[in-house]
Amino acid sequence: MSDQIPGAEKKVLCGVLAIIFGSLGVHKFILGYTTAGIIQILLNCLGVAGIIGIIEGIIYLTKTDEEFVRTYIEGERQWF
């Protein structure tokens, strides 16, 4: 039996993708936030999506697995 919290496996993947490809909203789509992902792509046209992705990636990676799951998987928080 694994001690990993369901949903926690997405934390590192989403964090790294948010930092690298944040302006494309890839991390939003992986979390199941299609509308937020599309908004992220549209924000890319304004040049602010990359900064948002970097900030979100850092936030994802600094949260504990429990906090990440509670906030982004169970709580469905789509931004920051």
Image: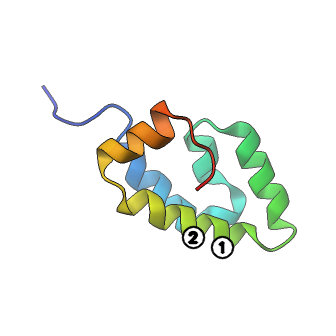
Residue 46 lies, with reference to residue 28, above or below; the image says below
Q: Position of residue 69 (x, y in %)?
A: 40, 39
Q: Quadrant of the N terminus?
A: top left
Q: Nearer the viewer, residue 64 or 49?
A: 64
Q: CA distance from mark 1 to mark 2?
A: 5 Å
State how the image is colored.
rainbow
Answer yes or no: is residue 20 visible.
no
Residue located beneath label 2 in the image: 54
Q: Count up the numbered dots.
A: 2
Q: Which mark is residue 78?
A: none
Q: Are marks 1 and 2 in contact (CB under 8 Å)?
A: yes
The x and y percentages for residue 66 are 31, 42
Left or right of residue 32, residue 34 in this image: right
Q: Left or right: where does residue 70 sit relative to residue 1?
A: right
- In the rendering, at what x and y percent does residue 3 appear? 16, 34
* Identity of the residue drawn at 68% across and 71% down: 50
| Residue 3 appears in the figure | yes
- Residue 78 location (% of width, % of height): 62, 45
Query: Looking at the image, which residue is at 76% across and 71% down?
Result: 48
Q: Secondary structure at mark 1?
A: helix
Q: Which residue in the rendered view is the most extreme toward the left?
A: 1
Q: Is residue 41 above or below residue 65?
A: below
Kindly state the secondary structure of the residue where label 2 is placed.
helix
Estimate how packed mark 1 is, as few (under 14), some (14 to 19) or many (20 or more) residues with alpha carbons within 10 Å.
Answer: some
Residue at x 44%, y 57% (from the top left corner): 60
Query: Which residue is denoted by mark 1 in the rendering?
Result: 51
Residue in the image at 61% along x and 64% along y: 53
The amino acid sitting under disc 1 is Ile
75 w.r.t. 65: above or below: above
Could you say which quadrant of the image residue 49 lies in? bottom right
* Residue 41 horizontal side relative to residue 1, left or right: right
